[in-house]
Image: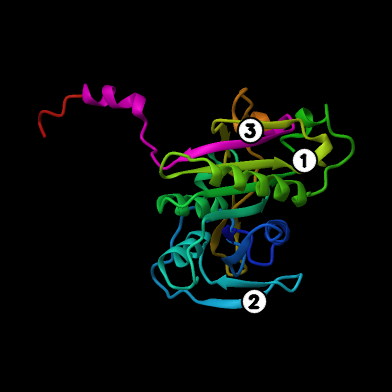
Amino acid sequence: MRVLLTNDDGVQAEGLLVLRQVLSRSAEVTVLAPDRPRSACGHSVTLHKPLRVSHVTMADGSPAMAATGTPTDCVMLALRTDLLPEPPDLVISGINNGPNLGWDLTYSGTVSGAMEAAISNVPAISVSSVRLDVAPYTSDAQAFLSGKAKMNYEVAAEFIADLAVKLLSNSLPKHTFLNVNVPSVPKEVLRGVQVTRQGIRRYSGMADTRTDPMGNTYYWLGGDLPEDVLEPGADVHAVANGYISVTPIQMDLTAHASLDTLRDWDFAAW
């Protein structure tokens, strides 16, 4: 199978390298990723300046391509230009350093890489590795964690290699992709896999107001800890309890339950 890899941590990120190494055992892998970190860029597209692609070497000497744009740009370039000799059978975005759970998906460049593939109806997976020895997971993780969890991309990469075969051997509805979060623990510590729904994770919003040396005010949006609603069946709950979370995500964002309510509103004047 031909696999395109991208991410939002940049072309030299460790998670991307490990994923490439594992997938290369059984697939033809092409890497096209941003030339620098693009975390939290969402589904942004570069419209007002040219995109440039360069050939680079990853830490293990393997070849890759680096683009000056976002993960979405990278997937667009791969699918809509002649940059690749053949189109990919599968697009995988990651492995992200940190979770993409619940409402994180609206911010995530990692998820948006897979989302762009889904728009073109190319099978896709976004994947993140989640440390459980840090807040907000500590209290929930202590039941099965011994010591501190180090970032373990290998476990996530091995799972994705298996999931990729399953995805290409089966079918999902059009314009649907899989968002995967893997606890960063040894495989023998994992509790298993749960198929989940998107949960609730919100950021209350830290914004520092500061003053520069010239006396001008500026603002710094920061990384306050998220607030997770740990509901059984949701991705945030599964990961917090030591399970790999696999969530099918669709492009249709319509609140279908509200359609009939809105139809009852009086729009006669219009």
Of badges 2 and 1, the one in the foreground is: 2
Circle number at residue 56: 2
Q: Which of marks 3 and 1 is nearer the N terminus?
A: 1
Quadrant position of the N terminus in the picture: bottom right
Q: What residue type is labelled 3?
A: Val
For disc 3, the neighbor class at 10 Å (few under 14, some 14 to 19, many from 20) is: many
Report how far apart the C-alphas of labels 3 and 1 lie in the structure.
Answer: 14 Å
Residue occupied by mark 3: 236
Quadrant position of the C terminus in the picture: top left
Residue occupied by mark 1: 134
117, 8: nearer the viewer: 117
Residue 196 seen in the current view: yes
Does 2 appear above or below 174? below
Q: Position of residue 114 (x, y in %)?
A: 52, 51
Of badges 3 and 1, the one in the foreground is: 3
In the image, the segment drawn in magenta is: 239-264
